[in-house]
Image (spheres, rainbow, N blue to C red):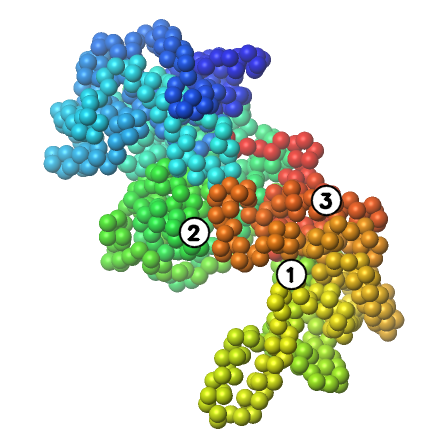
Amino acid sequence: MKGERGASMEKDLYFFDEGDGTNKRLLGGKGAGLCTMTQLGLPVPPGFVITTEVCKRYYAGGGKPPEGLSKHVSGAIDKLEKLTGKRFGDPSNPLLVSVRSGAMLSMPGMMDTVLNLGLNDETVEGLAKRTKNERFAYDAYRRFIQMFGKIVLGIDAKKFDDAFDKYKHKVGAKLDTDLKAEDLKEIVRQFKQIVRNEKGEEFPADPHEQLMLAIGAVFKSWNTKRAREYREFYKIPHDLGTAVNVVTMVFGNMGPDSGTGVAFTRNPATGEKKLFGEFLFNAQGEDVVAGIRTPLKIVELEEKYPRLYQQLLDIAEKLEHHYREMQDVEFTVEQGKFYMLQTRAGKRTAQAAVKIAVDMDDEGLIDRREAVLRVEPGQVEQLLHKQVDPQAKVHVIAKGLNASPGAAIGKAVFDSERAKEMGERKENVILVRPETSPDDVGGIIASQGVLTSKGGATSHAAVVTRGLGKPAVVGCEALKINLEGRMLEVNGATVREGEIITINGSTGEVILGEAPLIEPQMSAEFEKLLSWADEFKELQNWANADYPPDAKRARELGAQGIGLCRTEHMFFEKTRLPLVHRTILAETDEERKEALEKLLEIQRGDFKGILREMDGLPVIIRLLDPPLHEFLPKYEELLEEVVELRGDGKKPEELKAKEELLKRVVAMREVNPMMGLRGCRLGITHPDINEMQVRAIFEAACELKRGGCDPRPEIMIPLVGHVNELKVIKEQLERVAKEVMTKYGVEVSYKFGTMIEVPRAALTADEIAEYAEFFSFGTNDLTQMTYAFSRDDAEGKFLFKYIEGGILEADPFQTIDRKGVGKLMRMGVNLGRGRRPDLEIGICGEHGGDPASIEFCQELGLNYVSCSPFRIPVARMAAAHAALKSKGERRWETV
């Protein structure tokens, strides 16, 4: 197959010694890893991979195995028999295989696996004689029937679990390993009876029939609800398909010198360069991952079998150097002999991703470019999540394993479907389960965090939450979880469904009620990685900030300017609102002037604080944008007060004042305020407000300039749709600016520009650029006007259905709609720069913190993106990714 990609597509399957380990699209991640390990000389059981192309043909044929597949599989089994010296279905020396899924992109636990395939009433006896271990043989057989029954035959797993637990209780067995051979024979008999009862037929005994049915079941698992939900969350295409890996069985359940384990070559929670994992003696793989038994730390393997531990260390180092990446491996020890069953890039927390990337650069495994590309912008956002305040007094009711760091607060919910329903209603929930399975993935995605009473640091719950960046506490054995009663009890405390709990995934603590949270601290590795990102990015990162503390925080987080300072937020403050009322309701010019002068004094202080914090950096200040009536009492509330005062009749003076106010509010009401008297229209009809604001800006700037600072205000005139609006207002306000600078005897660097938020502004951007020195795309309003959506109404009433139903690919208020809104933006950029080549252009909606939108802004050639201060590190990383990708650097894939 190597070097023959075109020809390789003609084959349905490849043995591990011939498959191209770099072709994950064809062989899937698991199959590619098995091929690579085999060809590196690592101990891998023989086997073959059925390609993802076969899976696609399976679905194209309506869920039926493609023609010729059975023949190819039979031929492969013949070859496998020769390689192993065993025969499929042979009662004296049976060949047993596992049938495992494996997609191109890693989807831990989302698809199905069948172990011990090939067992029947005859081969189980042969296995017992061959191994001289009857207990082991029947343990393998009961596992096979249980797994095959659930995955292939579609029988409810609870029926097997209940029968198994009931029998264990009957014979007084606490652990599975307490069961004797005769017990397991009886369990096999009961399991086969369950199959008869549920399917009306005998459990299939022919190994070839078992194999083809299992292959079909693995293909089918590609399209299960849980797999689709996982792919949708991670934006993995639905058409990739899964490969199927048929691997000779090796057994970890053959006795005390056997076992199975999962290991990471570095700690997936912290990134520490130390082997991390878990191991179970006398067990099979699903026992570790499913959290059925609480496993031992990998260090136990070092203590009992130092030779095997050293072998694992050597393999880990070899794999890391080959892949230049932290690996997640599965292995089995069969009677003291070591076998590798899987390797893949390990899922990790954001904290670990940063440390691993920086450390691997220090170790010379990767360079800085690759280090930056290995940390996704979304992972950076996870690092900025709040943590439980270590100084706070909290009521800790239990402690488990700290499986995935961070703090999560929410209502305890004991069912995944209910968690999804509540999550869709924007309620914060903590999913509480004895252990999670792949079927819980929808509930995990909807939850703030996960709490389990079973499982270890490599259990399903731990692996999935780490990949999602959600906090998790697992293996909290003190919890007594009552799923039917929807409650848990622990150490005298009871938590019922709907009650608030906090989980601390960094310490493993479970806290009653809502714990106080604090802002996280950036690690030295994180700061170093962000500094590398800054070396590669081309877009500047500015922040939306309305107050000096916001600006200060933004600058600390790496902001290179303020892209939007909204002055109306200052007006809404309670102490200022009366002055705004007086300005709006003034009956004489004198009253209005007096109120404006007081507002000017306050605004001067506001602007001085922000300009001081951003000394030497640009600050875009948007003049008053909303309609004036938004600053007055709401019509409905005022009307209600008037009606009450009229009915009471005891306060005539107050009634008169309220009636007068109601008249003014009625006079100012608009049918469609969104498109009414606001923005630049307000500046034209009420120029004194704009003039007051510009005077305050320039007085603040001139005072700072006199004091040795370097203020750089940029005045944004909002809602311009016609060039003449901008022309009139700019001429009016530039006079004020020059007048103030003359008065102070200083020159301040400044610009006048506009927000491009009206489609007509984008269409006539060449005309507008004649007067604007900068454009700032107001992508929130531009999206509303382009779609004719009211954001509040759309998000509350139909937008979710549009996305869920595939009408829209994504929420256009979260990610820029490139085909519609994006086309207007591209037109605005090209027309604007065609008229004014040095035109400064950026965006200031929350799209400025969205990685996909930032990538589009890089493509358009914008100067900056502006977002909330807390998203600045995310935007810095996204800008670096966008710049590197535009130069052809390959984005690293977690596979």
Label 1: how many residues lie within 10 Å, few (<14), some (14-19) or many (20+)? many
* Quarter of the rendering containing residue 192: top left
In the rendered image, residue 736, in percent from the top left (x then y), is placed at 83, 70
Residue for point 38% across, 50% down: 421
In the rendered image, residue 698, in percent from the top left (x then y), is placed at 79, 69
Q: How many marks?
A: 3
N-terminal-most mark, 3 or 2: 2
Question: Secondary structure under badge 1?
Answer: loop
Disc assigned to residue 424:
2
> Which amino acid type is marked by label 2?
Glu
N-terminal-most mark, 2 or 1: 2
Query: Does residue 88 appear anywhere in the picture?
Result: yes
In the rendered image, residue 270, in percent from the top left (x then y), is placed at 48, 42
> Which amino acid type is marked by label 1?
Ala
The residue under label 1 is 545
Q: In this orientation, which residue lies closer to the viewer: 77 or 94?
A: 77
Separation of residues labelled 3 and 2 (CA atoms):
35 Å
Label 2: how many residues lie within 10 Å, few (<14), some (14-19) or many (20+)? few
Disc assigned to residue 503:
none
The residue under label 3 is 826
Residue for point 45% across, 41% down: 466
Question: Secondary structure under badge 2?
Answer: helix
Tell me if label 3 and label 2 are in contact, CB under 8 Å.
no
Separation of residues labelled 2 and 1 (CA atoms):
30 Å
> Which amino acid type is marked by label 3?
Arg
Q: In this orientation, which residue lies closer to the viewer: 372 or 207?
A: 207
